[in-house]
Amino acid sequence: MNQPVIQRAERMDAAVHVPVAIVGAGACGLTAALMLHDAGVECVLLERDATPSGSTALSSGFIPAAGTRVQQALGIEDSPQRFAADIQAKANGTAAPHLVTAYTQAIGPAVDALQARHGLDFVLLDDFLYPGHSTHRMHAVPEKTGAALMARLQQAATAADVSIVTRALVRELWLNPRDEVIGIGYERPDGALEYLACDALILACNGFGGNASMVRELLPEMRDATYAGHSGNDGSAIAWGRAIGARLADLGGYQGHGSWAVPQGALITWALMMEGAVQINAPGRRFHDETQGYSEAAVQVLAQPGGVAWNVFDETLLTFARGFPDFREAEAAGAVKRCADEPALAGLIGCDASALRATLAAVSPGAAAPDGRVFTRALQAPFYAVKVTGALFHTQGGLDIDAHCRVLREDASPFNNLLAAGGAARGVSGHAVWGYLSGNGLLSAIAGGFIAAQTAKTILET
C-alpha cells in the first residue's frame, strides 16, 4: 500500500504552485478538471499510472442520470427525486441522504455539460432496465464500454489543455498547523520526489478493493473473492484520512459482481439476467432471484459449491448480449459454451440431468419461483452457458464528506480545503453489498467530480 506520509509546515515556498491539485485521473478527476477548466480555474491532475484508466476503464461505462437532454429528446420522464427514491429503495434507506440528494441533482447537469461543452456523445440504453431502476436512465458513449468512456474523457482533457502528470504516485500530504492542505509530494518513476503547492486539493484517487489487508479487515465476506478491480485501489485515501483524523463512513459498502467469467477473467453483462437468463449451480438448480442485482449476486455465487455457477441462456438472448462489446470479447475468448440440448447442458455443468430438467421446466412465462422471481419467457434449446464466479469490483465506503464533497473530521466539521469524491469517499450504496444500485460507482465519480469542482472554485474565491 501507498503508506500515508503527513508533512506539517506553514507553507511550501519552493514548490510549484497551482490553485487546485487533483489526485487521480479517472472519471472523477477528469470530470472535476474539465469543470474547473470551464470555470477558468487552473488545476493539475496527478495520475499514478502511465495512462489514466482506473476503475472506470474496467467498468461497463454506464452512467445513471436523471433529467438529461438525452432523456428529454427521447420523451423519457425522470427526475432527481425519482432517481433518489430508487437509490434509497435499493439501499433500504441506508444511503447517506445528503449525498443521494446532491448526486442525483448534479449528475444530469454534469452529463449535459460533458456532452455540450466537451463533445462526449452519450446514448441512452433504453432496451432493458437494470435492477432497481424505475426508468431508462443509463447513459453511455456509443462504444458502450468503460474504456471508451475514459478515452473520450481524456480526449476532452487534452482538447481543453488540462495538465495531467502521469507516473506521479502521490506519497505525501502537506498540511499547515491549521489543518489546511498546502500541497502534496509525489514520486516519479526514478524514485525522486517532486512537490506541488495548492490552495485546494481534491482526492479522486481510489477505494481499497486492491488492498488485501483492508479487505480482510473491512469486508471479511469477500476476503477470498477474486478482485476484478484496478490495482491502484490500494486504500491510500483511507490511510491518509486515518492519519489526519478524518471521519470514515460506509466501509462495509461495495460493488460485487456475480458474473465474472472463469477462467477468462471477463465481465458478463447482467442485462442477460434481466432479459430472462438464469444462474444454475453445480447441482443443477437456481439458487437466488437474479433480478435483485448483480452486486449481491457475488455473495450468492460464492456460497455455491466451488464458488461458481453457470449463466444459462438461449439463442435469442445470445443475439441480445452480442450488442455489448464486452460480451463479444468474452465470447471471442471462449467463455460462451454451446449445448444442443438439456443432456448436453447437464454434461457441461456436471449435474444430474433430471435436476436440470426440473430447473429449466420451472422457467416459463408467468411462473413465480419460490425466491420471488417471476419469469417472462422460457429458455429454448440450443442453450448457451458461461461459467462464472463472484468478484469484488470496487468499494463504496471511504472518507466521509458533506454535500459539497468537503472531507469531514471526526467531529463532523469540514476541513477547509480538502475535498474527496469517487472511490476515495463514501458513496450512496449504504453499508452493505445489497445497497449497490447499478451505476452508483460512476454516479459518485462524475457527480462528485462535478460538485468538487464547484466547491474548489468557491474556496478560491473566499
Image (cartoon, helix red, strand yellow):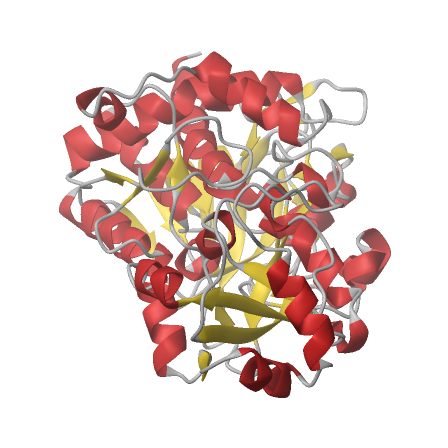
Q: Is residue 142 left or right of residue 379?
A: left
Q: Quadrant of the N terminus?
A: bottom right
Of residues 143 and 346, the one nearer the viewer is 346
Q: Quadrant of residue 129?
A: top left
Q: Quadrant of residue 412?
A: top right
Q: Does 416 sit above or below residue 9?
A: above
Q: Does 150 sit above or below residue 388?
A: above
Where residue 77 appears, as percent x and y from the top left, is 33, 16
Q: Is residue 134 left or right of residue 329?
A: right
Q: Is residue 272 left or right of residue 108?
A: right
Where residue 58 appears, as percent x and y from the top left, is 44, 61
Q: Across the whole image, how many numbered discs are drawn on residues?
A: 0
Of residues 297 and 39, the one nearer the viewer is 297
Q: Does 153 sit above or below residue 381?
A: above
Residue at image point 52% right, 74% down: 386
Q: Quadrant of residue 21?
A: top left
Q: Does 62 sit above or below residue 444?
A: below
Where residue 419 appears, as percent x and y from the top left, is 55, 31
Where residue 360 appears, as percent x and y from the top left, is 61, 64
Residue at image point 64% right, 33% down: 176
Q: Is residue 417 left or right of residue 214?
A: left
Of residues 205 and 422, the one nearer the viewer is 422
State whether residue 121 appears in this view. Answer: yes
Of residues 101 and 210, the one nearer the viewer is 101
